[in-house]
Image (spheres, rainbow, N blue to C red):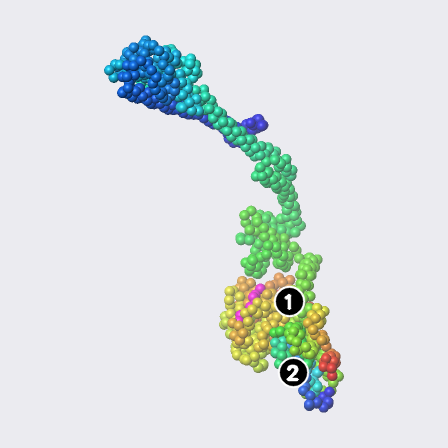
Amino acid sequence: MTPHGLDGDGMRRSKRRGWSLRNYMAMFIVVLLAVAASAAVAVRIMTEQDARQSAEVDANFAAHGAASEIAADLALLRQTTSSIAAGVQLANILASPAGPCTLTFAGGDFSAGHIDIITPDGAVKCSSQPILGGQVYGSAAWLPTAIHSAVTVAPFLDPVTREISAVVASPVEGGRGTVAAIVALAPVGPNLEAALGGARQLEFLVSTPDARTVLARSLDPARWVGTTLDGTAFARAEGEVERTGLDGTSRLYGWSAVASSDWVVFAGADKGDALAAADQFANRALAIILAGVGIMLVVVFVVYQRIAEPVRQLSMAMRNPTPGQPAKTVVGAGASEVAALAEDFDGLMTRVGSELADRLASEQKALVSERNYRMLFEGNPQPMWLYDIETLEFLSVNDAAVEQYGYSREEFLAMTVKDIRPQQDVPKFVQLLNEPSPTFDRSGPWRHVYKDGSMVQVLITSHAVKFGDRDARFVLAEDLRESQRLELELHQSQARAESNAELSRTKDELISMVSHEMRTPLASIVGFTELLATRQVTAEQRVEYLRVMLQEGRRLTALINDFLDLRRLEGGDMTMRFAPADMGWLIRRAVDLFTNDDGASIVIRVADELPLVRVDSDAIFRVVANLLSNARKYSPNGGTIVVGAHVLDGMAEVYVQDEGLGIPADALPRLFGRFYRVDAPDRRGIRGTGLGLAISKKIVDAHGGKIGALSDGLGKGARFTFSVPLVREPGDSGDVLVVEDDSGFAHLLEAELTGRGLTSIWAADAETAERLMNDKRARAVVLDLLLPGLQGEAFLERLRAKHGSGIPVVVVTLKDLDAADSLLLQRLGVTAVLRKGPGMAETAATLVAKSLVGELVAS
Amino acid sequence: MRTRTPRVLQVLRTVLIADDEPSMRLLVHATIESDDYAVVEAADGSEAWAMIQRLRPALVLLDVQMPGRTGLEVLRSVRADPSLEATRVILLTSKAQETEIEAGLIAGADFYLTKPFSPLDLLTRVEEALEL
């Protein structure tokens, strides 16, 4: 059944993993055949037994039936004879010579025979058939007995018919004769068979009680009736069911005694016939079993062909995988599951193959990159190192770092990255470390100190890496020379150009919106100009027209300014110059803008201990002023505007709250978009550029803060809030305090001071400068006299009053000084007074540096 | 025109100016001021439509960009009302875009002017529309 013999390989695998599917199949087939064979044998035995039993039952039943029929017939004959014998005329018949008389014979199964009235000497006086003369039964052995009593005798050779017969005789009273029914035995057998033989065609055999003589037989009665049974299987009535019949045929016999005569009836069923029927049945069963087995074998074969064989081939293919070459041979025949398995396997092989190839390639790449890394790191002419971002310890340094910084590798590894910075830079550096830094960062310039004490400015390129299991940063320190500075600028302008390109679409959209917004004021100006030029108008009309033209002209100007500012903010061209500032002072300055106007009154609520904020003062001033202006505009019915500031979540939060027209909820999210206006009838007359909040949002965004608006709806007022960062305590300390409202010049000064190894801190107004002086204790001051609030001279007087004359102060100003001013400054101990102009930042820085080392203080 | 004698017996026709910009309303009003017809103003689209229904003006000068109902919406309402068949409409648009103008003409404007426009030009158009 197995189409492929077990090969050596399969055997090995069976040992290793248990039976193969093929073995299971073979075992299944063997078991199947064994079961089928035993079923066939069992069916045969059982059907034979059944057939035998049923034949026996039939035979027994027939024997009893036959016995009772014979008994009934004999009883009938007895009754007939005795009734004739008792007849009144019988004495006359016996006494008179033989003459005609009427007797009717009826014998049932004893179908042939006759009734005679017989005298004691054997002469027949009357008969149911023609009478023979003489003493017909004179020699009959039964006659003397029959004269006196009833007898039943068989066999008896009837002298009249020459048939072997049975005699049933009844005596006539007084011994005068007997009435005898003499019946032929030969027809009895066939008659019984006809009545009771049935489908089995049973053989009937009747014998005398001693079972010596055959009285009747259904088969061949002429030959057998009257013969002896000695030496045959019927010598005894009891005994085996199966007997060999008189004709030599094996039959299954039942027997029964005939009542009132002691005859014995045998009924025999042909054993051969019975078994032949059983055989036929058993053969049919066998055929069914064989057919079932055949079907099972076909099923097994198909299953094997469709599953086991493809699986085996699949397994063979799996054992010799060729990367990149799918085992397509497998997919062909086989159950759909197997085909799917094969396809999956093909896919798997392809993936495994390509993954192997990938891994091989990436391992090679890793080797190469490891080599490249070694070369890049170890052999790089720029100093490089890795440091732990937790402990700040050096983890690895390259040769260039060792060579340039002057520390040996061992010394480096015992140091932290703080140790290569000047002492005064460390707080700023630590502060920067505390802030989340981007994965890749390029910053600078930073100051580094070599082992010999010399200081350099470097650009730091760093990115986060894993060093073993530690979070580290990889650092490349570039000595900042002129060429590199240029390169840096180029890089920055390229980055700007790229972001500009990204913004160009937004800008196009903005320009289209702006040109649309400009047309209305422009239409007024152009239109009224034309009216004035072409028409005669009254004086009042001219004034009115000119007023509108002026108003629209201003609106156009504001629009253009706002538009340009927004463009600068969006393009990143407007650089914020962050400096410490006093938020409360900025708010008061902004509120001052509105004190002369009519309208809602403004209340200032700034927290007392509000720390300094780190902002671009001009920009934030603008935001506050814009929010106040809006609050005023949208409070046409007056009310109170509250502007305040407090610390919230580590930031300074500024709010402007009014009791004006309010803002519907659906408008809140769009409020900070360009040219967005709330469309409600109550504010149709209120005009604006539509850019103020958009600009404010950009400014606050640039500070890392958030701006938002809240309103309970129309007529419920509005609250605008924005947040800006606070000055961080560890940072923003410096050697030199720069008090200068011109952020450009302040920046220049700071750069010059940094170049001389001095850190600086910038305040854009005197109020902030005072607070910084109190908190930070700068060692020197560079001061502008013309400031937004408190003037430079006043600041200086307070400084001297509070901190004494030990702090060198260099004045750089555009103010035209008269003699009194100069005298005042001299009295306040100013180191130098410089007129602001080109190169003055450098001069001022040099003077400050010198004064700090004591050269000028002495003179 | 101011010198012309008012025709007292004739019921004055009405011209409606609809613009949300006060300065524009003033300019247009000053430009077309005449004894031949009455000039009224509306400050937004909804107000304009209400006045059109009430006053049934002979001419409407309609700004396209208005809060509430836009000029185009008002124009469509006018054209959808058979009883306003005789009403002339001139659109004033600050968008010089073809699509805007096209949409206005499709909606049934008699004429359009792009801001900034010449007041004299506007006056000519108004007189043409009123067949003065």
The residue shown at (28%, 18%) is A90
Magenta region includes residue A705: yes
Please state the extent of the stretch shown in magenta in the rendering: A704-711
Q: Chain of mark 2?
A: B
Numbered mark located on residue A588 in the image: none
Q: Nearer the viewer, mark 2 or mark 1?
A: 2
Amino acid residing under circle 1? Leu
Residue behind mark 2: B40
**What x and y, as percent, mark residue A314?**
59, 35
**What x and y, as percent, mark residue A478?**
65, 55
- Report which quarter residue A100 is drawn in: top left
Crowding around mark 2 (Cα neighbors within 10 Å: few <14, some 14 to 19, many 20+) is some
Quarter the C terminus of chain A occupies: bottom right
**What x and y, as percent, mark residue A833?**
64, 73
Q: Is residue A673 left or right of residue A160?
A: right
Between A201 and B122, the one nearer to me in the picture: A201
Residue behind mark 1: A569
Q: How many marks?
A: 2
Quarter the N terminus of chain A occupies: top right
Could you tell me if residue A765 is visible in this image? no
Name the secondary structure under disc 2. strand
- Report which quarter residue A269 is drawn in: top left
- Kindly give the residue lying farthest to the top in the view shown: A139
The residue shown at (56%, 78%) is A635
The residue shown at (57%, 67%) is A669
The residue shown at (51%, 70%) is A646
- Kindly give the residue lying farthest to the left in the view shown: A174
Amino acid residing under circle 2? Val
Name the secondary structure under disc 1. helix
Q: Is residue A606 left or right of residue B89?
A: left
Q: Chain of mark 1?
A: A
